[in-house]
């Protein structure tokens, strides 16, 4: 059986590392600074997904957005209280 080149990229170690960094930034966005770490988490997650870590890279990007929104809501509730 011949090796047929596929259109999907192979997952690399760099892709997995960027995905993990994206999840770490999501946690930091929830705990520390939602704007900075939320954006960095989205960037790391998207780059990880593009490099081949498809489902987890996108999950990291979404987790960063959700964590940033939750953190902004909590900060807004504390300031207005």
Image (tube, grey):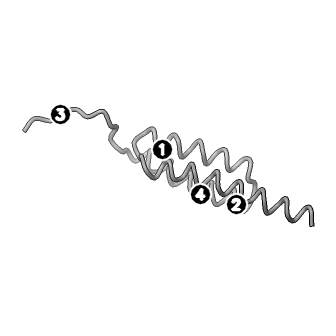
Residue beneath disc 3: 4
Q: Earlier in the sequence, mark 1 or mark 3?
A: 3
Mark 3 residue element: loop
Mark-to-mark CA distance, 2 and 4: 10 Å
Residue 25: which numbered mark, if any?
Answer: none
Residue beneath disc 4: 24
Q: Please name the residue shown 82% across and 60% down the image.
A: 75
Category of crowding for the residue at label 4, using alpha-carbon neighbours closer than 10 angstroms: few (below 14), some (14–19), many (at least 20) = some
Which corner quadrant holds the C terminus? Answer: bottom right
Category of crowding for the residue at label 3, using alpha-carbon neighbours closer than 10 angstroms: few (below 14), some (14–19), many (at least 20) = few
Q: Earlier in the sequence, mark 3 or mark 2?
A: 3
Q: Earlier in the sequence, mark 2 or mark 4?
A: 4
x%, y% of residue 46?
Answer: 53, 42
Compared across the picture, whether 36 is left or right of 24 comes to right
Mark-to-mark CA distance, 3 and 4: 36 Å
Residue beneath disc 1: 48
Mark 1 residue element: helix
Category of crowding for the residue at label 2, using alpha-carbon neighbours closer than 10 angstroms: few (below 14), some (14–19), many (at least 20) = many
Q: Please name the residue shown 74% across and 48% down the image.
A: 35
Residue 30: which numbered mark, if any?
Answer: 2
x%, y% of residue 57?
Answer: 48, 48
On screen, residue 59 above or below 4: below
x%, y% of residue 64?
Answer: 62, 52
Compared across the picture, whether 46 is left or right of 9 comes to right
Q: Please name the residue shown 51% across and 55% down the image.
A: 20
Mark 2 residue element: helix
Mark-to-mark CA distance, 3 and 2: 44 Å
Compared across the picture, whether 71 is left or right of 64 comes to right
Mark-to-mark CA distance, 2 and 1: 20 Å
Q: Are marks 2 and 1 in contact (CB under 8 Å)?
A: no
Q: Are marks 3 and 4 in contact (CB under 8 Å)?
A: no
Q: Earlier in the sequence, mark 3 or mark 4?
A: 3
């Amino acid at each position: 059986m011949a090796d047929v080149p596929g259109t999907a990229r192979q997952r690399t170690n760099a892709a997995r590392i960027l995905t993990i960094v994206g999840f770490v930034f999501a946690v930091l966005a929830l705990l520390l600074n939602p704007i900075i770490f939320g954006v960095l988490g989205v960037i790391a997650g998207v780059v990880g997904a593009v490099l081949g870590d498809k489902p987890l890279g996108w999950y990291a990007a979404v987790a960063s957005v959700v964590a940033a929104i939750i953190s902004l809501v909590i900060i807004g509730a504390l300031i207005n209280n």
